[in-house]
Each structure stands twice: as structure tokens, then as C-alpha cells.
Image: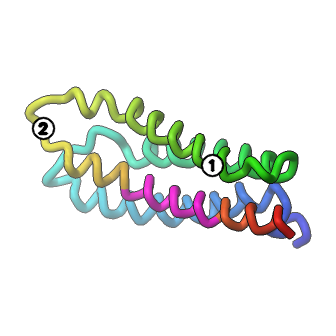
Amino acid sequence: MKILKSDTFYFLPALLVLVTVPLYFIQKLVVNSLADSYTFYYSVSNIYVFHFVVTLIILSVLYFVSKKAPNYTGFTFLGFVLLKMIAAIVFLIPLIKMEAVSKIPDFVSFFAPYFLYLFLEIVLTIRLLRQSTT
């Protein structure tokens, strides 16, 4: 399939979907197994929609920056990582403000995929940087 070559734009969303679907179902199984002992504030769906959308925006912008101004791809990545952290805090504010509830399972439920998506962003950014130097 020529459309999914790693240097085309459509490769990034396709890869993101291929990563998101299994991660979603794995986390859904884990959360459902813990549902008897803990009530999660955020659903797995909300968490994955947040991560999917944010990562798709970041990867899209990085792809276009790497094509138009490849010298700024790394700086763009650093800026978006900062914005992603801010977005995560804003997303978690209702949970942070809650009192008398154990927040650890919710934070683990949010930050496990956060770091997996961050790793994916790093790997794909390195790939874009390598492609722009050749």
C-alpha cells in the first residue's frame, strides 16, 4: 500500500489508530477488573479520546513543520510537549480538586497511556528529524 509509506502524512494517523485500539481494550479490561474495588472518575474512553486527539494534533503539526521548516521540528516538539503537559493538568483539574478520595488509580489510569503516547511521539519525531536530514 503506497498510501501508508512512512514518509506520507496518512502513516501517522494510521499508526496512531493501530496503537490506540489495543491499548484502549487492554486498559478497559484492567479498569473493569478493578471496578469492584474502585470507582474511576474518568472513563477509559475519555482518557483515550484526550490522548488520541492531543497526539494526533502534535504529530500532524510536527509532520507539516518537518516538511516546511525541518530545522524547527525539534523546537516544535519541545513546545508541544509543554502544551501537552498543560493540557493534561487542565484535564485533571476536577480530579485534583476532589477531596477524601484516593486519586492514585485515576492518575495511573491517565498517566500510563500519557507516557506511552509520549514515547510514540518521541519515536516518530526522531523519525521525522532523520527524514528531514536526508
Q: Amino acid at mark 1?
A: Phe
Q: Which residues are magenta?
A: 112-123
Q: How is the image coloured?
A: rainbow
Q: In the image, residue 87 lies at what x, y percent?
A: 47, 34
Tag 2 near tag 1, CB within 8 Å: no
Say the numbered circle drawn on residue 37: none
The residue that appears at 51% across and 47% down in the rendered structure is 51
Determine the residue positioned at 31% across, 63% down: 30
Q: Position of residue 7 (x, y in %)?
A: 84, 65
Which secondary structure lies at badge 1? helix
Q: Is residue 108 left or right of residue 26?
A: left
Nearer the observer, 117 or 129:
129
Q: Which residue is mark 2?
A: 101
117 or 44: nearer the viewer = 117
Residue 36: x, y in percent? 16, 54
Q: Quadrant of residue 33?
A: bottom left
Q: Which residue is mark 1?
A: 77
